[in-house]
Image (cartoon, helix red, strand yellow):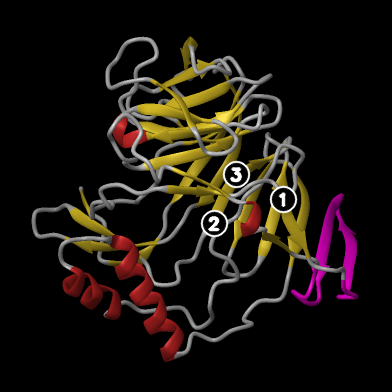
Amino acid sequence: MNARPHPAWGFVVLAAVACVEAPPTSAPVEVTDSAGIEIVRHGSLDTPEFSVDWGAAVRVGDAPVEGIGFFEVVSAVRLPSGGIAVADAGNHRVVYFEGDGTPRSTTGRQGEGPGEFQQMGLASRWRGDSLVVWDHRARRLSVLDPQGTFARSFMLESTEAVPWARVISVYADGSFLATGFADTGPGGIPSGRRGYPSPIYHFGPAGGHLATTGVFMSGESYFEALDNGGFRIYPAVFPRLNVRLAAGELFVLASNETFELRFLRRDGTPVRIVRGPSGVRPVSPELREAEIERLVEDDGGEAPEAFRRTLSAMETPEFVPEFTAAFADAVGRV
């Protein structure tokens, strides 16, 4: 497989908890019940919104930590103490900052031993005031105490039914949401925009497999088939997304193609569906060109013109996707 490289390094801007809430509106909301599943329909997107108060933001990483800038940051976490932990995957470490952004300490290095990392994929607040780090290559979860000291590590259970899994989110009770192998179908992967389905699993706080939530589509990318049977992956212009994440005690599948959030229990039982209006903004030539330029600028690759030509040749959806990302907190707000 061939993939475009990420930018070499970058700084992190992490906002403080202060937010600005827009005043409530009288947008129509219809709540119905269908076979025990709550259906919530928003007649308008003119609903209460939250925006970041940049005046209360904290910027970390302007000054090099131990002489090295960040390289492939995968998580930035606000700790119960008010401090900030940044998972710096490219440098195989977690960097701790005080609440005002002052560097405090680092933990971890490249390796296979306790407290060492090979390929960080996620760092999240965990039980109590600890931090849990998922190492994708080592297939291992490491627990760090509030000072960043390594406490212990454990693996996800591997069974015949679940031979491989990757942690992508953490539930409020400390259990894990993970995904398995994507089903790309028979034969090679053809060129074009596409996403593939993969299973969602629920693992307990000790790593044991508890349930399979179901099989769901993931995000859409652009695949370029190569003569040697491999392929390159590029970001798609206005990609269709199915964001999969833990929200409190529930699993959420958020589709940006139709503005729909599906809330399920961890065994796959549906609980609630939230829908909003779709097809609000057509993709105009101006919006398409602006999105292409944003992707080229964010890419930071060594061949921007070639990348721009690839993006310009892609087909794009008729309407701008309803959102570009989804996040959730421990009490289930999305």
Image mark for residue 18: 1
The answer to whether residue 76 is above or below residue 240 is above
Which residue matches tag 3? 245
Say if residue 70 shows up in the picture.
Answer: yes
Within-10-Å neighbours for mark 1: few <14, some 14–19, many 20+: some
Of circles 1 and 2, the one toward us is: 1
Note whether residue 159 is visible: no
Q: In this figure, which residue is indicated by the disc labeled 2?
A: 242
Dot 3 surroundings within 10 Å: few (below 14), some, or many (20 or more)?
many
The label nearer to you, 3 versus 1, is 1
Q: For the residue marked with disc 2, what is the amino acid? A: Asn
In screen coordinates, is 109 left or right of 211? Answer: left
**Up-down relation of residue 97 to residue 328 (above or below):** above
C-alpha distance separating marks 2 and 3: 10 Å
Looking at the rendered structure, the secondary structure element under dot 1 is loop
For the magenta stretch, what is the residue range? 25-47
Instruction: Tell me whether circle 3 and circle 1 mark residues in contact (CB < 8 Å).
Output: no
Residue name at image x 65 percent, y 52 percent = 56
For the point 71% across and 37% down, the residue is 330
CB contact under 8 Å: marks 2 and 3: no
The residue at 74%/74% (across/down) is: 45
Give the secondary structure at mark 2. Answer: strand
Chain-order first, disc 3 or disc 1: 1
Q: Which of marks 1 and 2 is nearer the N terminus?
A: 1
Q: Tell me how far mark 1 sits from mark 2, CA to CA.
A: 28 Å
Give the residue furthest to the bottom. Answer: 285
- As drawn, the label of residue 248 is none
**Residue 125 vs residue 4, the one in the foreground:** 125
Disc 1 vs disc 2: Cβ atoms closer than 8 Å? no
Image spot of residue 148 (x, y percent)? 50, 18
Q: Position of residue 147 (x, y in %)?
A: 54, 17
| Magenta region includes residue 41 | yes
